[in-house]
Amino acid sequence: MNLRFIVNDYILIWNLLFQASISENIHKLKQKIWINYKKEYNDTMKDNPVILKDPKNFIPNDDTIYNIVLETKEYENIKKDTEKFRIHLLKIWDDNKKKAIPELKSILRFDVKLYNVLVVNAKLDIIDVTDPKGKKVNTIVWGKNYDEKNPIQTIVKLIFEIVKKETKNYHEDDSNIVEAIIELAILNEFATRMSKVSNYLTGNNTLIYLKKQIYPYWLMYLGVAEKDFQTYMSRDNIIFDTSKYPYEKQLKKLDLYGFIDFCIRNKKYILKTNELEII
């Protein structure tokens, strides 16, 4: 897996125009454009999926709105800030990718190809993993600020969104199980390996109990020997009765998709709420 961080004028302008205004000046600019160029403004709103399909080679049918924004001092300043933001994200990735890439591959057991991260201004506070209709693209729009005290979490959150995108529409009827497993893989195990501190009780609060039910099988998937279960339970503060969980040797041979399939096929057996002791 690798990540390419890019600032693209068209996607940045589109989000400045059609997301919540990040400043009073941008709000006034949007109002001015709307008053004077209603048709062009409405037409530009449709561009987002087209840009995402091929951002590098995107050419608008009508560049009136883009040119107006490009020529403003406000946009010049926003782009400079966005470029600085991109450099910070790139540094965080470069500082951690040597460890992150093999750890991720070890957990997922399949390759995630190169992803383009289209960086927009952090004040937008957005993540967009939308695919153009009828086509999957290895592109994500990122406008979430980073935690300077804990930069690893930026990588964790970014990869979490990418893996969710990779599994989008996979077993929609069991989306809660799919998301719980992705949390176990990225927000919990990957984050734990990267930070060397257990992250197993983090994530969506509504999924915690479900993840605890899957957890014994998750340890088997990771290849943890039965004799080491207690060590992991102590580390992660998740306790279960090992005698009630026959060891499924085949799980450590699966990739994450295979593990998802296993959990969905066996959900009536796995999701036994009365057999899990929770601390």
Image: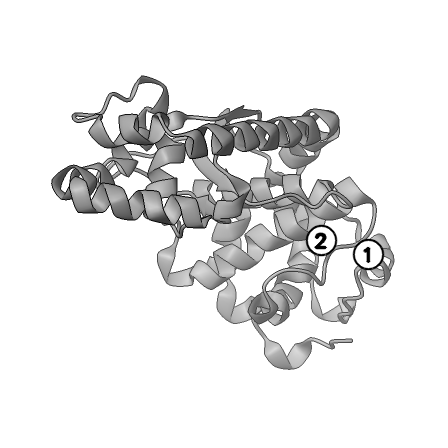
Residue 142: where, in percent of width, then height?
Answer: 50, 39
- 131 relative to 231 in the view: left or right: left
Residue lying farthest bottom?
274
Residue 268: where, in percent of width, then height?
Answer: 50, 70
Query: Along the line of sight, which residue is nearer the eye, 130 or 179?
Result: 130
Residue 111 appears in the figure: no
Q: Are marks 1 and 2 in contact (CB under 8 Å)?
A: yes
Numbered circles on residues, count: 2
Q: In the rendered structure, which amino acid carries the disc numbered 1?
A: Tyr
Residue neighbourhood size for the residue with mark 2, other residues' Cα within 10 Å, grouped as few (<14), some (14–19), many (≥20): some
Residue 262 appears in the figure: yes
SS class, disc 2: helix
Residue neighbourhood size for the residue with mark 1, other residues' Cα within 10 Å, grouped as few (<14), some (14–19), many (≥20): some
Residue lying farthest left?
39
Q: In the rendered structure, which amino acid carries the disc numbered 2?
A: Leu
Query: Along the line of sight, which residue is nearer the eye, 144 or 237?
Result: 144
Check disc 1 and report the residue beneath it. 232
Compared to 205, does 40 lie above or below? above
Q: Quadrant of the N terminus?
A: top right
SS class, disc 1: helix
- 177 relative to 29 in the view: left or right: right
Which quadrant of the structure image shows residue 32? top left
Q: Quadrant of the C terminus?
A: bottom right
Residue 103: where, in percent of width, then height?
Answer: 70, 34
Compared to 114, does 221 lie above or below? below
Q: Residue at x 63, y 32 (%)?
A: 89
Sooner in the amino-acid sequence: mark 1 or mark 2: 2
Check disc 2 and report the residue beneath it. 219
Residue 134: where, in percent of width, then height?
Answer: 24, 37
Q: Residue at x 65, y 51 (%)?
A: 187
Q: Residue at x 45, y 38 (%)?
A: 141
